[in-house]
Image (cartoon, grey):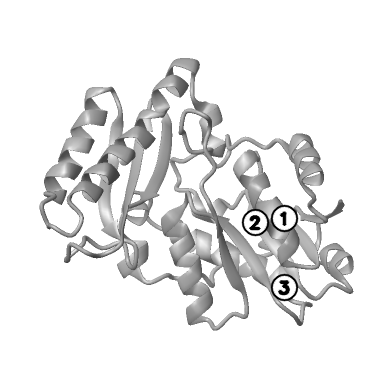
Amino acid sequence: MRIAHTLEELRAHLSGHQHPAFVPTMGNLHAGHLALVRQAKPLGDVTVASIFVNRLQFLPHEDFDSYPRTWERDCTLLKDAGCDVLFAPKEKVLYPEPQTFKIQPNPALADLLEGQFRPGFFVGVATVVMKLFGCVFSESKGQRTALFGQKDYQQLMVIRRLVQQFALPIDIVAGPTQRDADGLALSSRNGYLSPSERAEAVQLSKTLQSMAAALRAGAGTGATDIPALEAQAMDSLRARGWAPDYLVARRRSDLLPPTASDEPLVVLGAARLGSTRLIDNLEV
């Protein structure tokens, strides 16, 4: 695996390749990231990953400074997963001057759910993704592919809309959510959980599974009272000591509340357990 810390090194390592398959990450890697790298292998002629903790997507009170940096471990994991090129720029490489030009996603998508509780988050995500795309794909003339995990469901939608609206010649491929044996969605922030919190954390995915089962049972009949279902889910987590931000059923197409009984749905949740904020989703 070749490592690039500058744009010049990255372009030299990608010289002669026309079909990059790219997996952007913030490091502190887990099996979900590595599954994306393995999924990327047959989709291009060079597999590229990036590690960059993006300051723009952290709110002032969030964990940018304390976000785990596990460089040597990440390099070993990526190499073993088959990554060909790792792009790991310093902040001054990706942001050589203050980033005053930013990508503003459509507020109708970006200002609800995660965007409501983390204002400006998707501006930071969209801006860094656009910059990384420019770095990784600038020299390629063939098929370009980028992979993102479905655990970050709303983020995946924002990136797909970004690529569509800017007519970028990039295929966005979703990787299925990777879970521990008990069902907890893998996340870099799971490492913040104490042993007792880790045992409790699976209740988020269990709550979403219960919501999805209730929606399936009422599918096509309009019998499910969705606001009541959402309120019950919030109350059930609060009773266990969680601080939920949202537990909702939304249309897969735009993440707005459903208006018809036959619309494809997704249930999404975000909740804080102790000091750790977890998110998850499940398509119905």
Residue at coordinates 44% horizontally, 16% vertically from top-left? Answer: 196
Q: Earlier in the sequence, mark 3 or mark 2?
A: 2
Element type at mark 1: strand
**Badge 2: residue crowd in 10 Å (few <14, some 14–19, many ≥20):** many
Residues at badges 2 and 1 in contact (C-beta under 8 Å)? yes
**Badge 3: residue crowd in 10 Å (few <14, some 14–19, many ≥20):** many
Q: Earlier in the sequence, mark 1 or mark 3?
A: 1
Residue at coordinates 89% horizontally, 74% vertically from top-left? Answer: 16
- Give the CA separation, mark 2 to mark 1: 5 Å
Task: Residue at the far top: name it.
Answer: 196
Q: Is residue 160 left or right of residue 217?
A: right
Q: Is residue 103 visible?
A: no
Kind of residue at disc 1: Ala
Kind of residue at disc 2: Pro
Q: Is residue 158 visible?
A: yes
Residue at coordinates 38% horizontally, 36% vertically from top-left? Answer: 205
Among the 4 quarters of the image, the one containing residue 203: top left
Residue at coordinates 34% horizontally, 37% vertically from top-left? Answer: 271
Label number found at residue 49 = 1
Element type at mark 3: helix
Residue 74 appears at what percent x and percent y? Answer: 74, 40
- Give the CA separation, mark 3 to mark 2: 13 Å
- What residue did someone put label 3 on? 137
Task: State how many labels appear.
Answer: 3
Q: Earlier in the sequence, mark 2 or mark 1?
A: 2
Residue 142, above or below 37: below
- What residue did someone put label 2 on? 24
Q: Is residue 70 left or right of residue 205?
A: right
